[in-house]
Image (tube, rainbow, N blue to C red):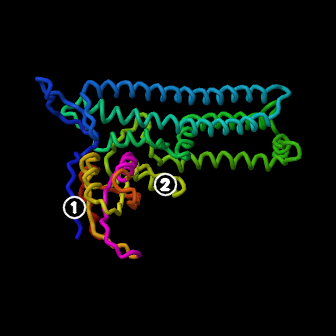
Amino acid sequence: MAKDEESPRPESPFQASASTDASSTTSEAVWTYRGYRLRASEFTTAMVHFFRAEIQRANVWRQRLDTTTNWAVVTTGAAIALAFDPNGFHGVIILNTFLITLFLYIEARRYRYYELWSYRVRLMETDFYAAMLVPPFHPAPDWAESLAESLLHPDFPISMWEAFGRRLRRNYLWIYLILGIAWLAKLTIYPTLIQHWDELMQRAAIGSIPGILVLSSGVFFYLLMVLISLLTAPLQQATGEVLPRYLEEVRGVPLNRAATEAAKPWFRQSRRRKQLVALIITDQAEAIAEIILKDMHRGVTAMAGTGMYTGKEHRILLCALTVTEINQLKSSVHKVDQKAFVMVIPAQEILGRGFLPLEESPKRPEGG
């Protein structure tokens, strides 16, 4: 028979609450979490300093993005100037195109770092500062857990494909367009206008590489860039600077998730918070359950089990928790029972008290 222990844990592990200080004559709102009690002024001061630090990090990587774009613009101008010199060669433009592609890759990689810091800033803006401006102060249930998870286990909130596509559409398609026009102008009208197709093939040739192969490679490259920009356009895993964090739902699926799922499988990247289920096989079930209930404020379900090898009965504790709590759980179990057997299993989704609210699943349309 399974025994379910009700947890006193609030909807959010970081949720603010009001309490009365026994040593004070007035009531003051405090921030409580896992036994810690911070006054509102102390918590706000810490959040302000943290917010300023993340803003600084985001600004640094934003400047690095601008620097890479500046490199691309300067080298493009220099390459076109050299190509249109009376003794210039159109291969300079082709070489610069490869260099621009390298800059695009570097910028996409930098953009992923920028999105990491920007993601944290947006979490604080939408769920701390914005919630503070609209009484009563009520952040989203998962915002602080998401922020803590990002600090403990940093992970890029945007895939390399999405970052590459964003920078390509915003900046580099225009640079490629200018290079393409300059390349065709160099081949067709400078220094003299071509008279027939064979002359174009002669100008396009690079050493022993035939002109038709050079032109075909150029057309293929530009089509590939356009194709990448179109395929990555639906990806919206990262909210970015101006996209809202919370979007309206389409058929029960958030817009950003729906757009991501519509893309090719090799572009997908999960962005869900890491939620876990712990199974603890122990002979000290009551003591361990008490620690989990009182110190971690998590619910515990006790079940009876039998070891098939020894034939001995044991208690099995089932506990749902987040990735930020797993170290505390293992430490608590080790203090009570060093012979305990602990299994930590990733959970696809956990809904209910202490996690995201349990909502009714969207109904399927008739005939679907």
Q: Check the image and report above or below for 194 versus 359.
A: above
Q: Check the image and report above or below for 345 versus 26.
A: below
Q: Return the x and y of residue 292 as percentages of the image width and height.
A: 28, 51
Q: Residue at x 28, y 41 (%)?
A: 34
322 on left or right of 203: left
- The 10 Å Cα crowd at callout 2, few under 14, some 14 to 19, many 20 or more, is some
Looking at the picture, tell me which residue is in the foreground, 228 or 279.
279
Q: Nearer the viewer, mark 2 or mark 1?
A: 1
Q: Residue at x 29, y 25 (%)?
A: 42
Identity, as a three-letter code, of the amino acid under mark 2: Ala
Q: Secondary structure at mark 2?
A: loop
329 within the magenta span: yes
Q: Which residue is mark 1?
A: 4
Rendered image quadrant of residue 252: bottom left
Report how many numbered discs are placed on residues in the image.
2
Query: Which numbered dot is residue 76?
Result: none
Rendered image quadrant of residue 40: top left
Identity, as a three-letter code, of the amino acid under mark 1: Asp
Rendered image quadrant of residue 218: top right
Q: Check the image and report above or below for 336 versus 316.
A: above
Span highlighted in magenta in the image = 309-333
Q: Residue at x 81, y 42 (%)?
A: 204
Q: Quadrant of the C terminus?
A: bottom left
122 on left or right of 172: left
Q: Quadrant of the N terminus?
A: bottom left
